[in-house]
Image (cartoon, rainbow, N blue to C red):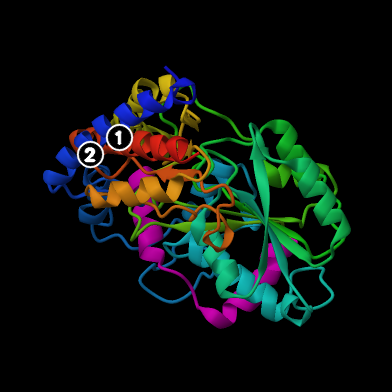
Amino acid sequence: MLYTEMTKEQLSAEKASLEKQYADYKAKGLQLDMSRGKPAPEQLDLSIDMLLRCLDGDYKSSNGIDCRNYGVLDGIPEAKKLFEEMLDIGDDEIIVGGNSSLQLMYDTIIRALHFGVYGGDKPWGKCDKVKFLCPVPGYDRHFAICESLGIEMIPVDYKADGPDMDVVEKLVSEDEEIKGIWCVPMYSNPTGITYSDEVVRRFANLKPKAKDFRIFWDNAYCVHHLSDDHDTLLNIIEECKNAGNPDMVFQFTSTSKISFPGGGLAIIAASKNNIDFIKSQMTVQTIGFDKLNQLRHCKYFKNFDGIKAHMKKHAAIIQPKFSVVLYMLDKEIAPLGIGNWVSPKGGYFVSFDAMEGCAKRIVSLAKEAGVVMTGAGATYPYGNDPRDSNIRIAPTFPSVDELRQAMEIFCVCVKLASVEKLLAE
């Protein structure tokens, strides 16, 4: 029965029952963590031979570079080729960096603030104000970059196939202070949505008032499928070329959740004009990134087919965890009408929308019962979810048994917060 159809007496009885269940869970003293999208230890073990056996005394790249020494700013040839196959881009459209795509994004914005971007009139930092569009719910670390650098954030709601492009097109065409937009286009963090072909093409055909506007295309989950029945995503760099806007996009990805989050490879991909402009500044910052790590990855994976085969091993570990989350929500929450969610085909998260005004209460209740979630509001700029409804569920790190316990507690917290809200009304 839907909670909204219950009488006050029925809701009161339900509340009493839920409070007893909740007290029983609290008494167990559990410590379960679903706060971040981290790979489980079993996933990290998949790549351990990369560290133990790959180099075996051979430290030279395919073109004879000694990877133990200085040099090669944009990546050894085989590392570039690995990502070129993954993203279908050209050799002159990529820089292979260190282990963190987030650092590359941060550095890209810092350079834009200090030096501007290719084709711009002046550095962003010399503008009176810099604004970014932020599709919501979105990735909290994107928002933290903007907030730390004083960039004003403008939320844009998601639709079923990506950001509301009517709003995006209107805002960028009218306001030259809008210099960028954050995008996680495939298995979006946290919604799990993949942008439709129409949305990608509309991005590529944007007509921004600021000619130095850039799309920050954080393609973190481009190979993170849960099964062979997976989403596909149009090539944004190719679509921007077709639209006559070749320089409008910066694309990022990494192997953080493919090999090791603390020791993977990250890249920035863009037009040759953008890449040459970035390299001219980056050469002051570094002589070159960790080529030994690049060589390790290339010897281990060999090619993109090797990465795809490796990702099937990841899927075998995490798909059952997503199934636990979705089964519990379908079983415990759906019949009551007190939440909405998307069943993603990949990525690392399930986005849950509770009844308006309940997210903070749910997360607080869960924490008191021993289940740590991502903070309510974290998926919105400045930590402000105007509806106080969105909660990001991160299923990958706990074991299946731990996750089952955590979801039992989570569902009780959702029910209890919802009943409290309805009784208060």
Q: Quadrant of residue 198?
A: top right
Tell me the amino acid under the disc marked 1: Val
Does the rendering let one see residue 16? yes
Residue 193 coordinates in the image, percent (x, y):
56, 35
Nearest the eye: 6 or 291: 6
Q: Compared to 245, does 18 lie above or below? A: above
Name the image quarter holding residue 419.
Answer: top left
How many residues crowd around disc 2 within 10 Å: few (fewer than 14), some, or many (20 or more)?
many
Whether the residues at callouts 1 and 2 have beta carbons within 8 Å, the answer is: yes
Q: Mark 1 points at which residue?
A: 412
Is residue 285 a member of the stretch shown in magenta? yes
Query: Which residue is farthest left?
Result: 28
Q: Residue furthest front?
A: 9
Tag 2 secondary structure: helix
Secondary structure of the residue carrying numbered label 1: helix
Q: Which residue is drawn at 41% across and 62% down?
A: 99
Q: Mark 2 points at which residue?
A: 22
Q: What stretch is highlighted in magenta?
A: 273-301
